[in-house]
């Protein structure tokens, strides 16, 4: 691949950062508030959340929109910013992230975080990890564009915005791999230890830049 005009976009949760922060907000914080307000056991509230989350599914924009869930669970009175902030100690980068971002910067690649996280989560993660110092642009696809990555138009818009060559990497097999590939974007599935994977999935980001520059296309299906 020519290095000219190369942009690399990364998913955020589960790719650059551990999912423990977002998981805690959705699977501990929200059930905790439901349990408190309705005077029911947290385990019952958690089961309710699991069931309602599953009905919506992660391909829908509703999945990512806190306001939708606050309305559904009748939690409009809570201070959601405070709730989210109470879990920010769980925000951590994977160890293999900084070497990759440093390499991108050395080589002059434009870097983008392209995430389905809303600003409520994304901004906290960017601030606490210090990613703002190493990444050129941050896009919350739901909040900034009113879309989700399951919609190939989101990737088409990203590609058009950047011009040149685009490579995308992320941990969601559909959102970060199949969708971008369906419109001809070079995409890599980063498998972080759970969920479905392919033979071509990469086990982390170590060596990622060398891999894409070497023109090794074995990661294609
Ligand atoms: Mg992800």
Image (spheres, rainbow, N blue to C red):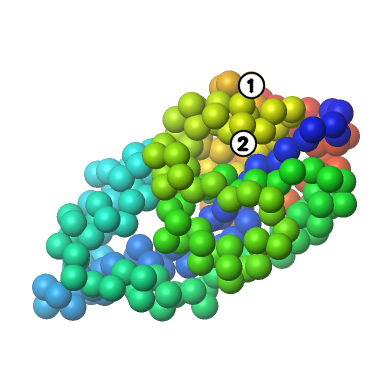
Can residue 179 be seen in the rendering of this structure?
A: no
In front: 166, or 94? 166
Instruction: Determine whether the residue tagged by mark 1 lies in a helix, strand or loop.
Output: loop
**Residue 91 picture location, percent across and down:** 55, 70
Q: Quadrant of residue 213?
A: top right
Q: Which residue is mark 1?
A: 184
**Residue 111 picture location, percent across and down:** 70, 46
Image-based side of 135 in relation to 177, left or right: right
Camera-nearest label, 2 or 1 = 1
- Could you tell me which residue is drawn at 49 percent across and 74 percent down? 88
Classify 10 Å Cα crowding around label 2: few (below 14), some (14-19), many (20 and above): few
- Could you tell me which residue is drawn at 51 percent across and 62 percent down? 123
Image-based side of 150 in relation to 31, left or right: right
Q: Are marks 2 and 1 in contact (CB under 8 Å)?
A: no
Q: Quadrant of residue 50?
A: bottom left
Query: Which labelled disc corresponds to residue 198?
Result: 2
Query: Which labelled disc corresponds to residue 119?
Result: none
Q: Quadrant of residue 221?
A: top right
Can residue 220 be seen in the rendering of this structure?
A: yes
- Could you tell me which residue is drawn at 11 percent across and 77 percent down? 39
């Amino acid at each position: 691949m020519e290095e000219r005009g190369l942009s690399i976009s990364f998913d955020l949760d589960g790719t650059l950062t551990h999912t423990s922060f977002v998981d805690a907000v959705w699977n501990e914080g929200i059930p905790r508030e439901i349990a408190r307000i309705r005077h029911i056991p947290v385990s019952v509230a958690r089961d309710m959340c699991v069931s309602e989350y599953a009905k919506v599914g992660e391909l829908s924009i509703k999945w990512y929109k806190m306001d939708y869930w606050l309305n559904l669970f009748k939690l409009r009175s809570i201070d959601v910013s405070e709730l989210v902030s109470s879990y920010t100690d769980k925000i951590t980068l994977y160890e293999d992230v900084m070497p990759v971002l440093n390499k991108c910067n050395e080589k002059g690649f434009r870097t983008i975080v392209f995430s389905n996280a809303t600003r409520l989560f994304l901004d906290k993660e960017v601030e606490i990890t210090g990613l703002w110092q190493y990444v050129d642009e941050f896009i919350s696809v739901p909040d900034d564009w009113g879309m989700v990555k399951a919609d190939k138009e989101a990737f088409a818009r990203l590609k058009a915005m950047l011009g040149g060559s685009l490579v995308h990497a992320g941990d969601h097999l559909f959102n970060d791999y199949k969708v971008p590939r369906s419109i001809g974007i070079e995409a890599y599935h980063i498998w972080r230890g759970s969920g479905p994977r392919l033979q071509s999935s990469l086990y982390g980001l170590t060596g990622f830049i060398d891999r894409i520059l070497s023109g090794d296309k074995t990661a294609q299906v």
